[in-house]
Image (cartoon, rainbow, N blue to C red):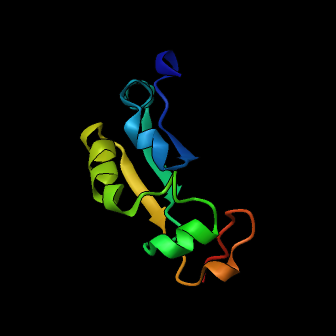
Amino acid sequence: MIPLKRRWYGQGDIRVAHNPELLDLAARSGCKWIFVGFESTNPDNLKAMKKEKINIVEQYAESISLVHQKGSIFSDRLCSAWIMMTKAFLIAP
């Protein structure tokens, strides 16, 4: 992608923010936007979804900051009622 000089957009989980090598490569290759589903800010809901080890509420702000520092826009979706979700798929309102 780097030689093509194209802008692109991606999707991943919150762990992408804590992988500096991946973030740097994404930024250099033209990544302008990363979509991440936070699912919930309630630790009990995250535990019920078995996502408490991936989505750590206390790290959300830091994760967003790390992505922004590399020049990408961090887009997120927060599900207010996690019951609407099936296998981490968010049904947007």
Horizontal side of residue 72 vs 6, given as left or right: left
Q: Nearer the viewer, residue 72 or 22?
A: 22
In percent of width and height, residue 15 lies at 47, 43
Q: Quadrant of the C terminus?
A: bottom right
Numbered circles on residues, count: 0
Q: Is any part of residue 78 visible from this angle?
A: no
Examine the rendering and report whether any part of residue 69 can be seen. Answer: yes
Q: Please tell me which residue is depicted at 68% across the width and 80% down the height of the picture.
A: 84
Question: Residue at the top extreme?
Answer: 3
Q: Nearer the viewer, residue 80 or 92?
A: 80
State the residue at coordinates (49%, 15%): 3
User: Residue 40 appears at what percent x and percent y?
Assistant: 49, 72
Quadrant of the snapshot with the N terminus: top right
The image shows residue 24, relative to residue 34, as above or below, that is above
Between 22 and 4, the one lying in front of the other is: 22
- Please state the horizontal and vertical placement of residue 88, each as a whole percent of the image: 67, 63
Residue at image position (45%, 26%) is 29
Q: Is residue 29 above or below residue 34?
A: above
- Residue 39 in the image: above or below residue 3: below
2 is higher (above) or lower (below) than 89: above
Residue 42 image position (x, y, % from top left): 45, 75
> Which residue is at a point 33% across and 55% down the rendered structure image?
59
